Amino acid sequence: MVAEPDGSKDDPEDGTADGSADSTPDGSADGSAGVPEDSPADSPEDRKPVSDEARSAFVPPVGVEQPAPPEEEHPTSEFALPPGLTTEPPAEQEGSAFAPPATYSAKTSPPAFTPAYGVPLVRLSQNAPWQDRMRTMLRLPVGERPVPEATRKEDESGPSVPRVLDLTLRIGELLLAGGEGAEDVEAAMFAICRSYGLDRVEPTVTFTLLSVTYQPSLVDDPITANRTVRRRGTDYTRLAAVYTLLADINARAHEVTPEEAYGRLAEIRRNRHPYPGWVLTAAAGVLAGAASVLLGGGPTVFFVAALGAVLGDRLAWLFAGRGMPEFYQFLVAAMPPAAMGVLLTMLHADLRPSAVITGGLFALIPGRALVAAVQDGLTGFYITASARLLEVAYFFVAIVVGVLSVLYIAVQFDAQLNPEGALHAVERPVTQILASMVLCATFAILLQQSRATVLFATLNGGVAWVIYASIAVTADGSTVMATAVAAGLVGLFGQLIARYEHTSSLPYVTAAIGPLLPGSATYFGVLAIAQNNLDQGFASLAKAAALALAIAIGVNLGGELARLFMQAPGAAAARRAAKRTRGF
């Protein structure tokens, strides 16, 4: 067969000039030169030209090899490992959903994590007092609290949740009404719930409201119960009985069911006060007489001050029986001691009227509420602390109004009230130490303490007065500093003996701060205001407030020092508190 000379046997419209559809094995461009002569002719559809839109602009022509990319422009992922770096082999699966990743190392973790080596595991020591263990739990974030221990109850289903929450609120009400701090009340409530198997609970304590929330799981609805504290009373014997019940609930050696706890709680509520009313009235009189002796008074001053305090106490009881608010009870209780002092002045007796009036104020100054208020503020319960401080302020105002009313009437009758006669210090060490111990013992009786705690509170108060007199009188130091140091020792000793007895520290602390209360500064401030010396009066009242705060801060600091040197409840993380906010 002879081909035509120009090789145009195929019409251009019938061929595939671009070679995109019918390229030959030898890679010819036009697809006609390499076709054998005996090959069959293409169909009209196969010979139809292909448009440019059906081809990619980046496809190279047939027969042209695609050039290799430059060495420095290899396409790669930004997550690809650089050459020469190998990954660690995956760790064996331990079956825990909370196991760290295989490539994670605590030692090489970024410094942005806090702490850099992970959160330490908290293990609570069972030998530490339950108050410290529960306080440690409350100060930890929820995610860092240790795994709850197995329930100690025989019944696997556990007690009824509403019943446990109600028992928790009732015990917390007794503690808060008895003057316990908000943090200690929360620790007690948390301990009760945790003892009965309710681990995911959040107790909340304010001045008049208690609430506790329990969430069974992350997908279940929470259960919340609350209780309002409407009445407050001072009975440290009842408070000690509640702490005994709490210790039995939290002890492993005891098995206190909710029914048994309810029975013991009802028995605690039904218990009568350890001292009758006439003993309390006599104790108020002896307290005022002992305080007047501390300030330099003699036997006559002692009896006059005691008589004024007894009359004031009876008036307060009368107003309380009529349903009058506490403000008016404090107001009328402060008037008879002031009247006795004015009477001695008008009789021109060579006595110390200021000691009579000041002694009568010692039984009225709310030292217990003040210590609790400052303690709540230092531990972060600012709402409760503000409410307690407002209550203390109202009581102070009531005392000032009562004394000021009597003094203003005395000034109108030209009574020569001279505050300078009681400003000089009187050094009678033996007499004053004995008077301070008598004051503490009678103060403990007024607080309805058990007879077993009165002795230690008396000795603690005597030591506090020795420290105060050594700094303020003998060494002529600052009275505020002397008060703070003496109150710190009171708090330290009280906290130590309370941890040894597994009870509250209030019976060992509150009565012991009696000799340190700012009765003289309060009286002199009120007297200066009555004599129109406003600057001097407000300065003296400010000094009284400073002394009161020094007592409260000293007691709290002493308690914290006692916990600091005791056995830590956590093996890896001790009693954590909130971090400093740095002003923002």
Image (cartoon, rainbow, N blue to C red):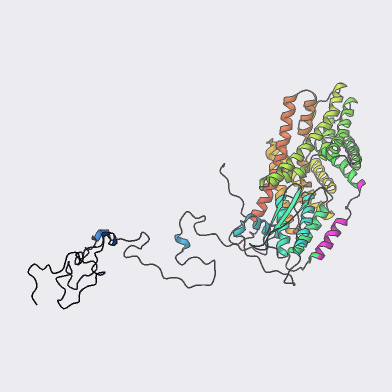
Residue at image location 81% in from the left, 52% down from the top: 236
Q: Is residue 5 left or right of residue 251?
A: left
Q: Is residue 478 left or right of residue 257?
A: left
Q: In this view, does 496 lie to the left or right of 1?
A: right
Please identify the quadrant where the N terminus is shown: bottom left
Residue 212 image point, x, y percent: 72, 56
Residue at image location 79% in from the left, 61% down from the top: 245
Residue at image location 57% in from the left, 62% down from the top: 121
Q: How many labels does the image show?
A: 0
Q: Is residue 339 left or right of residue 484?
A: right
Closer to the camera in the image, 417 or 365: 365
41 is higher (above) or lower (below) than 76: below
Closer to the camera in the image, 390 or 525: 390
Q: Which region of the structure is painted magenta?
A: 259-278
Is residue 265 found inside the magenta-colored segment of the image? yes
Residue 519 visible: no
Residue 114 image point, x, y percent: 52, 55
